Image (cartoon, grey):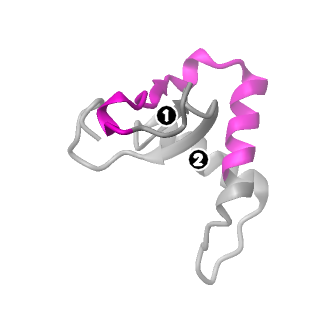
Amino acid sequence: MSDSWEDPQERPEPVAVPYTELSAAALQGVIDNFILREGTDYGDRTFSHEQKVAQVLRQLERSEARILFDPLDSSVTIVAVQPGRKRGQE
């Protein structure tokens, strides 16, 4: 595959991966990677790693976030879903 896309429409789109389709170990790895990579600022409060994992899992369960796989670079990330938007409209 070429990493230079003359026409952005030719670039493969990220694929949504339902969190329920991942094994427990794979889901834990995706969430851990996301938390460690993001370095999210939680303001004045300090949350343990376990609390952050629980927060992300709740967001996935409530469809407030979803997992995306990028076939171009084989990466996985978690993204927030905009309120009021249905899947596929992000």
**Amino acid type, mark 1:** Glu
Q: Residues within 10 Å of mark 1 (few under 14, many from 20)?
A: some
Query: Is 60 placed left or right of 56 in the picture?
Result: left
For the C terminus, give its image quadrant: top left
Where residue 28 appears, as percent x and y from the top left, is: 74, 34
The quadrant holding residue 22 is top right
Residue 25 colored magenta? Answer: yes
Residue 64 vs 38, above or below: the answer is: above
Image coordinates of residue 16 in percent, x first then y, are: 45, 27
Is residue 82 in the magenta section? no
Determine the image quadrant of residue 64. Answer: top left
Residue at image point 58% right, 41% down:
77
Residue in view at x 69 percent, y 37 percent = 30
Q: Which residue is mark 2?
A: 56
For mark 1, give the secondary structure.
helix
Residue stretch in magenta: 6-34
Position of residue 87 measured from the top left corner of the image (x, y, whole percent): 30, 30
Q: CA distance from mark 2 to mark 1?
A: 9 Å
Q: Is residue 68 left or right of residue 57?
A: left
Tag 2: amino acid: Val
Nearest to N terminus: mark 2 or mark 1: 2
Q: Nearer the viewer, residue 76 or 26?
A: 76
Secondary structure state at the residue bearing disc 2 = helix
What is the number of the mark on residue 72? none
Residue at mark 1:
61
Question: Looking at the image, is 57 positioned above or below residue 26?
Answer: below
Q: Are marks 2 and 1 in contact (CB under 8 Å)?
A: no
Tell me what residue is drawn at x 54 percent, y 43 percent. 78
In this view of the protein, which residue sits in the foreground, 7 or 41?
7
